[in-house]
Image (cartoon, rainbow, N blue to C red):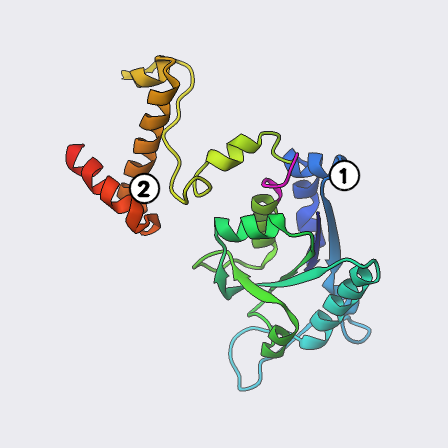
Amino acid sequence: MTFDIITLFPDLFSSFLNESLIGKGIFKGELEIKLTNLREFGIGKHRQVDDEPYGGGPGMLLRPEPVVQALEDRKSFYENQDRKVRSILLTPQGNPFQQKKAEELSACNECIIFICGRYEGFDERIRDYVDEEISGGDFICLGGEVIAMVLIEAISRLRGNILGNQESAEQETFSHNGILEYPQYTRPLEFRGQRVPEVLLSGHHARILEWRSQQARQRTLQRRPDLLTEKHKGKDARLDESS
């Protein structure tokens, strides 16, 4: 799987690309991550990439010429190899990124190009040249680089051998029926008066699965009721009454 990141600050990705499972995935050839420096497509001898907004206002906007030229350069590079490309603008105005989108993107065989914003955002005309816009959530960062890292991790860990344990990806929060994950415990058996639930020590797999299912629904009802479908809500109302 290939990611290409158009950014003004490629050095921000150094540790990210060399550590943890992402680094291992690159080393094993499971992942390919390219960094495209937007400054190389800047205008004039100073490689200008931004300018003041028409109509006034604070800050600077990324100009359309460098961004679109960088995007077209990377798209043609992959298309000349007969590879499909999906371009994604990372912006707070995009659709909020969710697990379903991670699953969708992990299943595609396209080269994914992320365009990272900076300053006060993008010239509006840039939006006409991308396939979609994605937001990391209802908050503002200094730029899109951190969001690009989040998306790459969320997408990559669902691919084949990256995580190393596909069952783990399938059972965790948001992946299993779209609800929160059940409580989990490890050693010691007792910590400051809190003991591991007996059902987890029973060795009775059917009972453990039922307990985990109930706990996952209960936790979702308490913390993220917005995630529950109508199908879940009937079960969870009964669980809440009995707790």
Residue 210 is covered by the magenta coloring = no
Q: Compute the Cα span from label 1 to label 2.
A: 37 Å
Query: Looking at the picture, how far across and down is residue 52, in whole percent?
Result: 61, 79
Helix, strand or loop at mark 2: helix
Specify the principal SS of the magenta part: loop
Q: Tell me which residue sits at (70%, 34%) in the image.
A: 24
Residue situated in front as seen by the camera: 170 or 44 = 170
Q: Tell me which residue sits at (55%, 48%) in the image.
A: 103
Q: Tell me which residue sits at (34%, 35%) in the image.
A: 216
Helix, strand or loop at mark 1: loop
Give the image quarter of residue 15. Answer: top right
Q: In which quadrant will I find the C terminus?
A: top left
Amino acid type at image mark 1: Gly
Query: Looking at the picture, how far across and down is residue 106, in whole percent?
Result: 61, 48
Residue 218 seen anywhere in this rendered image of the structure: yes
* 225 to the left or right of 113: left
Q: Tell me which residue sits at (55%, 59%) in the image.
A: 142
Give the image quarter of residue 61. Answer: bottom right
Residue 158 is covered by the magenta coloring = yes
Residue 41 versus residue 7 in the image, above or below:
below
Residue 97 versus residue 208 in the image, above or below:
below
Disc number at residue 220? 2
Tell me which segment is drawn in magenta.
Answer: 156-161
Disc number at residue 100? none
* 143 to the left or right of 185: right
